[in-house]
Structures are given as C-alpha cells and as structure tokens.
Image (tube, rainbow, N blue to C red):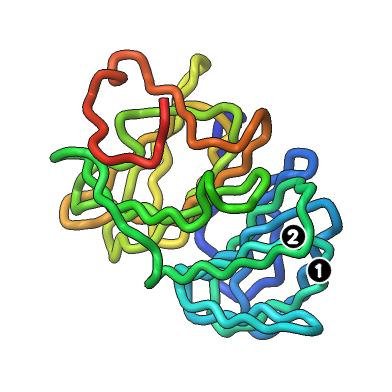
Amino acid sequence: MSGRAIKVEALESATGLIELYRHGDYAFKWALLGGRAPYSLEAGKEAVIACLREQCIVEADTWRVELSPRDLLYLTGPANLTLEGRGSLVVIGEAPSERSQIRLVKRFDELSRFTSGLEGYRRDIYVALGEADPSDRLMAGFTEGWPGEWTSFPPHKHDDKVEIYVYYGLNGGYGLQVVEDHDGVDVFKVRDYDAVIIVRGYHPNVATPNSRICYLWILCQVEGRKSMRVEFQPGFEKLPLGTTHLSR
C-alpha cells in the first residue's frame, strides 16, 4: 500500500459499522444496514452521518430523524444512537470538536446546485456542510459528473485534509480514480458504492463514456482551520475553474 489512498469495494451483505480509516480522532466508517445497529459518538467529537442507498433512520432517546438517499445529519457528541434500515448504506465521518448540542439535517432536495468546470470536466456540485456551517473540522457534499467527463479537475490536493469518496450513479459503467503524489501514482477502477479514502495527493477522476461518476465526499480538516483551500497540480493551475466551491 502506498499510503496515499485506500480503496474499499462495495459492501454486498448486511453489516454493522465497519471502520475504514482512523488517524487519531479522525475516522471514516460505513455499514450496509440489515436492521438496527448501535452507534456511539463521544463527547468532544462531531460526526456526519450520510445515507446513500434506501432510507435510514437515526434515533436517540429524545429524537428521531429519517434520512432519504443523499440526505445527511451533522451532530456533536456525546450521543448514543441507533441506526436502522434495510439495504441502507450509511457513511460516517468523525472528527474532534469543541462544540456541543448541535444537530443539523441537510436534505439533498433542498441543497443548492451549481455546475463547475468547462467541457471535458463539468460536474454538478452540492455542498451540504461547508465552510459557513457550524462544524469544526467536517465538510461534506456531493459531486455528480457529466457523462464521460472528469471531476475533481483541474487536479488538486489538500494534504491538510483527509477525504472519503463513495461513488454512485455509474449504472453499469465504471470510473478511474487517480491519486498521485511525489512518490508515485495509484489508479483505482471504481464502481457503484465503492469507496476511496484519499490521505494525500492530487485526486482527479473520470467516468467511462455514457456513465457519470458521482460521489459523496466527506472532508476532515486534520491540520489548520477548516477551509476549502486546495493546491492545484503544476501544469494545470491555469486551467479555468468556472464556478467553484474551492479556493486557491
């Protein structure tokens, strides 16, 4: 393994929560629910809980939230929760937080959409948890590429942040996820509901013709202040961005 990135293939049968990545208090987890599964979030932490397949329910002693596909919940600990669903793919990002008593539900149908990039690298962006939202270190959203085009392009990196992509919408096609740093390059063939954790490096991706590479993304700000600041790969930094949620 290069240490740049980790690919995890789609879950095929019901599971409890599985930890995909951990670095100190930063973690990514997922589950393909086949009923009820417990989830505890400690004090001093925050979490994004995203639903990608089927509906799921997140329940505590005093509240209950129903999430449709591409909805997400942000909350701070402590919290003892139950996740419930049938065939529901749940993806969780965790990070340290000094906040408390926050709970936000972001409905995909209510998110603003904008198209980023130009021909060859167009995609629709939905920012669900951004710089202006009251999270300390977590950001999240959805990118939906145009058929056969690149996303996360021009190639950029943010080595102060670790990120997970969970793909969907390829519908029988596949994508190629590139992750490159000064030590080399990884290229992963990805299909619906595979995941790639990007630890460091430039990370563009592309779909096969007539397929769209779409993905949930969750960012954990490991170093410094939460931001969408990125560094573009030399040779690509002058390519026009169009409308973007990123900053140089």
Q: Is residue 139 above or below residue 236?
A: below
Residue 68 position (above or below residue 176)? below
Image-based side of 14 in relation to 147, left or right: right
In which image quadrant can residue 149 be found?
Answer: top left
Q: Report the side of 233 relative to 148 (left or right).
A: right
Residue 4 drawn above or below residue 182: below
Name the residue: 54% across, 38% down: 198
Residue 142 or residue 184, whichever sits in front: 142
| Quadrant of the frame with the N terminus | top right
Give the residue type at disc 1: Ala
Tell me where residue 71 appears, x and y as whole percent: 49, 70
Callout 1: few (<14), some (14-19), or many (20+) C-alpha neighbours within 10 Å? some
Residue 84, given in percent of the width and then of the height, sits at 65, 82
Residue name at image x 64 percent, y 51 percent: 135
Q: CA distance from mark 2 to mark 1?
A: 7 Å
Secondary structure category for the residue under label 1: strand
Q: Nearer the viewer, residue 64 or 131?
A: 131
Q: Which residue is mark 1?
A: 79
Res. 215 in view: no
Horizontally, residue 166 falls left or right of residue 145, namely right
Residue beneath disc 2: 76
Task: In this rendered view, identify the residue nearer to me: 27 or 195.
Answer: 27
Q: Are marks 2 and 1 in contact (CB under 8 Å)?
A: yes
Residue 151 picture location, percent across and down: 31, 42
Give the amino acid at mark 2. Thr
